[in-house]
Amino acid sequence: MSNHLQFRSSAFWIGLHDVNGSNTDGIFKWSDCSAITSSYWSTTPQANGEYCVSASQFDLSWKIRPCTDKLPAVCENRQPCSCKLSFDSANCADLETSVSSTKLGLSEEDCKTQCLLHVRSNEQCWGLSYDPTTSTCILHERLQTKNTCTLPLRYYRKACFSYRADPLSRENTTYTNTDVNPESVCTTGDDPIEPSIDCNYTLSVDITPPPCSCPKCGSEVSGLPEFWGNSTLQEQIDWLVTSLKVDKTNTSIMRRRKYSATDSRMTAASIGYAGAAILILVVSGIVILDMNRLWRDIKQAFKGVHMYILNKK
């Protein structure tokens, strides 16, 4: 745009204005009553008064100024019936750097129709490359072009807007009767004004859905409920969360807190065997160390019993 406005000798209206004319609420709308989605405000101090927005003839930055000022205006020329695809013989898409989707078995006209309708992850198709030898349609969502092209790919680019520049040279350009001041036709709650264009499209192409990674799009998966194929993603997530939830009250660690529970794990059995072996070794060691004294005590006990019996007789 800047290349075609270099001959301008002054700032120009861009069709943006404050709705209530006082700039107290900061609501700016375009001439079709649509809200702004991006901005390029100037960093210089803004004027006071009834506020309309102009663009600088030097850097195209936006500035607020009284709507009574008379300036040239720049207008948008939207292509009738939305966007068009045009063949570009001088450039082509760089397939290595562009982000694209590939569709097979389409004619060239069907490929162009696909590009006009194609949206993937909120990104539109802005150009296409078509190989007539293989009927391969490549739709470019993020497009990088180059001028060194390889046949047989045919490249089309999408255009949704056009411009018309003043053909007069910079020296001869004058603005005697072309300056205007904007007039608001919007209120704060107005919706964008739709252009009255009569467009009739006859679409013969079935738009194929994007690849799906859900089980219902592929082969049958065992263990899934019957409603899985007709359920929403949130319902599938809720079912998986419920199915994978573990009841802690039935776990062995919870049962062992209250009573001795059987534990069939190999590690638990190994710990039990090791404990029993240590206990046997300790008891055996005590018995072996006191064996002699224990034998003497047993013999002494027998002698005592024998003497007691003899004395009774």
Image (spheres, grey):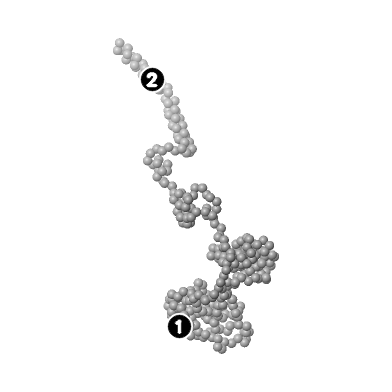
The answer to whether residue 110 is left or right of residue 69 is right
| x and y percentages locating residue 16 in the rendered image | 50, 78
Provide the residue designation for mark 1. Answer: 49
Query: Is residue 262 placed above or below 18 in the rendered structure?
Result: above
Q: Is residue 278 visible?
A: no
The residue sitting at the left extreme is: 312
For image coordinates 62% across by 84% down, the residue present is 168
Tag on residue 298?
2
First in sequence: mark 2 vs mark 1: 1
Q: How many marks?
A: 2
Spatial CA distance of label 2 from label 1 is 121 Å
For image coordinates 60% across by 79% down, the residue present is 164
- What kind of element bears circle 2? helix
Say if mark 2 contacts mark 1, CB within 8 Å: no
Q: Amino acid at mark 2?
A: Ile
Towards the viewer: 274 or 134: 134
Q: Amino acid at mark 1?
A: Gly
- What kind of element bears circle 1? loop
Query: Is residue 138 placed above or below 57 in the rendered structure?
Result: above
Mark 1 residue crowding within 10 angstroms, few (<14) / some (14–19) / many (20+): some
Which corner quadrant holds the N terminus? bottom right
Tag on residue 253?
none
- Write down the quadrant of residue 22 in the picture: bottom left
Towards the viewer: 236 or 201: 201
Mark 2 residue crowding within 10 angstroms, few (<14) / some (14–19) / many (20+): few
